[in-house]
Amino acid sequence: MRVFHSIDELVPAVGTELGTSDWLMVDQERVDTFADATGDHQWIHVDPQRAAEGPFGGTIAHGYLTLSLLPPLLRQVYRVEGGSMTVNYGLNRVRFSSPLRVGSRIRGTARLASATSVSNGLAVQVELEVTIEVEGVEKPACVATSVIRYFA
């Protein structure tokens, strides 16, 4: 795990790989819970019998579920200490390049693409290029640029 002891250490680290998380299982229970939370009960996600006859041979995770797993994956990759607050500022680019079959394991890899002082120097805004790979699958399930603000 990469540890930054203050937000001031972020800017000099631009361009570095931060690391890779452990593997995380994406099971049907997680997908069903996400479907209940979002109201998205499309059969390709929640009906294993029907999905077995579909284009992917089984159920697949929602793209937004895959994206929502960024925080727990990134918590294993790096942390920033000494700040007062961290804010998810958004996303600049997201692609779901491969379906995430239910029952697969994923992990996240992050690279610090940019770090810029903002809010009159009271915060640092970072862009993380995150790749969520699926065990045994060539193309990643998701590639995203996550924007986070760390306040002193």
Image (spheres, helix red, strand yellow):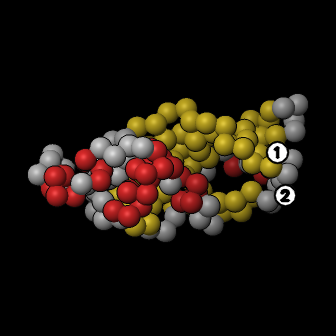
Q: Earlier in the sequence, mark 1 or mark 2?
A: 2
Q: Residue at x 88, y 31 (%)?
A: 120
Crowdedness of circle 2 by 10 Å Cα count: few (<14), some, many (20+)? few
Q: Secondary structure at mark 1?
A: strand
Q: Position of residue 58 (x, y in %)?
A: 20, 56
Residue displayed at 34% across by 46% down: 41
Determine the secondary structure under disc 2.
loop
Please state if 113 lies on the left or on the right of 137 as rendered: right
Q: Is residue 93 left or right of residue 54?
A: right
Q: How many marks?
A: 2
Kindly identify the residue that appears in the image at 11 percent across and 52 percent down.
53
Q: Is residue 110 left or right of residue 85?
A: left
The amino acid on which the numbered mark 2 sits, given as a three-letter code, is Gly
Q: Residue at x 49, y 68 (%)?
A: 22
- Place of residue 117 in the rendered image (x, y in percent of width and height, measured from the top left): 80, 35
Dividing the picture into quadrants, the one containing residue 52 is bottom left
Rounded to the nearest angstrom, the CA distance separating label 1 from label 2 is 9 Å
Q: Is residue 106 visible?
A: no
Front-most of 51 and 107?
51
- Which numbered marker is on residue 151? 1
| Tag 1–tag 2 contact (CB < 8 Å) | no
Where does the image place residue 11, in percent across and percent down from the top left? Answer: 74, 43
Which disc is residue 129 wearing?
none
Q: Quadrant of the N terminus?
A: bottom right
> In front: 2, or 27?
27
Q: Position of residue 132 (x, y in %)?
A: 43, 52
Is residue 82 toward the left or the right of residue 136 in the image?
Answer: right
Would residue 149 be seen by someone viewing this image from the given angle? yes
Residue kind at label 1, given as amino acid type = Phe
Per the image, the residue denoted by label 2 is 82
